Amino acid sequence: MANIQNNQYFYDSAKRGIPAVDELREVINYRNLILQLVRRDVVARYKRSVLGIAWTMINPLGTMLVLTIAFSQILRFNIPGYPAYVLSGLIAWNFFSQTTTASMVNLVWGGQLLRRIYIPRSSFALAAIGTGVINVLLSLGPLLIIMAVVGLPIKPELLFLPVPLLLLLLFSLGVGLIISTWAVYFPDVAEMYQIVLSAWMYLCPIIYSEEMLPEQMKIWLPSLNPMWGIIKLFRMPIYDGRLPTWEEFWPSLVISLSVLVIGWLLFSLKSDEFAYRI
Amino acid sequence: MNLHTESKLTTPIIQSPGNAITLADVSVRYRVPSERINTFKEYMIRWMQRKITKHDFWALHHVNLTISKGEVFGLVGRNGAGKSTLLKLIARVLRPSQGRVQVVGHVVPLLELGAGFHPELTGRENIYLNGAMLGYTRAQMDEKFPRIIDFSELGEFIESPVRTYSSGMYARLGFAIAVDDQPDILIVDEILGVGDEAFQRKCAVRIEEYRNKGATILLVSHNAALIESTCQKAAWLERGELLAVGSPSEVLNQYRLLQP
């Protein structure tokens, strides 16, 4: 904890406040670092390839195309405007899987930095979320075009999208912090998480809809999988063109906030040890 | 999981206004597993078999040290003596397992310059990124930017990705960012092998300037001659314990006697 007293930096290792609060204060002090890390991620990707930033849009479009051909043409799923349905779900899912993975990978690989200078340890997770938000914004363009192509109306309810995006963001940050704490201790968590992610994706309403679930699964799957409700909420203002009811909204709000609080507490409590471990 | 940090408020402290750095009875303990367990799977198996054993490794042991404001302080010791651990405590990267560390002033560590550079980004972009890592705001960096370019002597290369830089250019840029402002406390870890001779002289001049303006400088080296010629006070660290603190000539005489 470094306080600036009388315009002077003062650090005392024994004056440790509540770790979660200290971490939050440092994040605010270092907000410029988080912005710069987001910039680094975006700019570095832009430079690495000819198409650069376009990949952010092409990648989900490609997956959408494959899934559309597989499920609406071959398996004959009967969901109207299927490409828009898949794409809106995929954008939310990609945000979750990419930001949580990036939080973990950046923390472990950024370890050489954490061992040399002090920066708030949660900077990497927060920067991953920032990069994720930019990716979502960039993929909205192609999504709106696809909606127009399949003949879905674009309604003013779309303006509600920042609210489910916020829930998605809180939940992803919470999960990202929990698994990065874990990955600091055990490097194979990164590998295991990739397997978990691919299974988890099929337990989410991305390529299929809730109506298509078998009766008994309809009861437990949506309530046990926190991403279920979040993806549904994310899709509502886009694909369904409507606002959620309060009953649809509050469970996801409670879950996202709780996961974030747990993740933040756990991460900040353990973060003093990271420099010993990474 | 073990909590390494058990620093107590009760540790006596002697923070007088003239001290820049105070270490009071500081110990750092690393918990080393007796056998390296790398994976979670392995950990779970061992845990169920109750076969996880650990031993303690004390990287620093009851170290008491004060460094006054404006002092040029040298720290000698062999590899593995605990020098880096001590620097990490001061740079607040590590918290002590026991004891208390107090630091008054903004610390700028000159360790492995350019550690946070991204190879694909240009020199310009990396200046802003690295500045943010040192805790500067965007506005502060805008103000520092022209001076940094000037000092680094990179010229038009500032617009090229740093992966195209030579190691000398890389270090020059890192140094220019770190020493642009007068820091209160400067940690110098054998870096003066940076760039060509002219640039090295420039670095030495800059450090000398800061010293004259009252910066506290902590110089870490196993080069005894360098410490003797530049420092006012020195300490010798061996296996995590401070064996001697005092005038550089006394400390180094003892240090040399015990070197093979």
Image (cartoon, grey):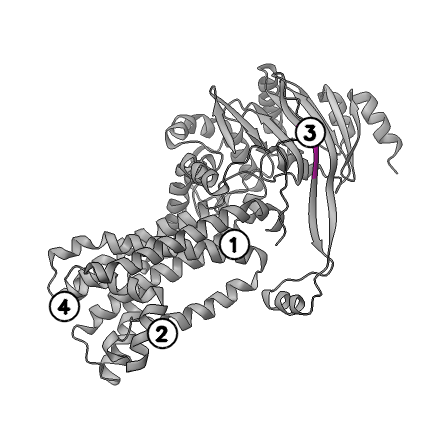
Above or below, A91 against A3 in this view is below
Q: Amino acid at mark 2?
A: Tyr
Q: Are marks 2 and 4 on the same chain?
A: yes
- Of the numbered discs 2 and 1, the one sitting upstream in the chain is 1
Instruction: Quickly name the residue at label 1.
Output: A181
Tell me the CA gap for discs 2 and 4.
26 Å
At horizontal 21% and vertical 62% (from top left) the residue drawn is: A143
- For the question of whether residue A182 can be seen, the reply is yes
Per the image, is B167 magenta? no
Q: What is the crowding at mark 1: few (fewer than 14 residues within 10 Å), some, or many (at least 20)?
A: many
Mark 1: secondary structure: helix
Name the mark on residue A202. Answer: 2
Tell me the CA gap for discs 3 and 4.
70 Å
Of circles 3 and 4, the one toward us is 3
Q: What is the crowding at mark 2: few (fewer than 14 residues within 10 Å), some, or many (at least 20)?
A: few
Which image quadrant is residue B187 in?
top right
Viewer-proximal residue among A228 and A119: A228
Of circles 1 and 3, the one toward us is 3
Label 3 with label 2: CB-CB less than 8 Å? no
- Of the numbered discs 2 and 4, the one sitting upstream in the chain is 4
- For the question of whether residue A48 can be seen, the reply is no
Mark 4: secondary structure: helix
Chain letter of disc 2 in the image: A
Tell me the CA gap for discs 1 and 4.
44 Å
B170 with respect to A144 (left or right)? right
- Of the numbered discs 1 and 4, the one sitting upstream in the chain is 4
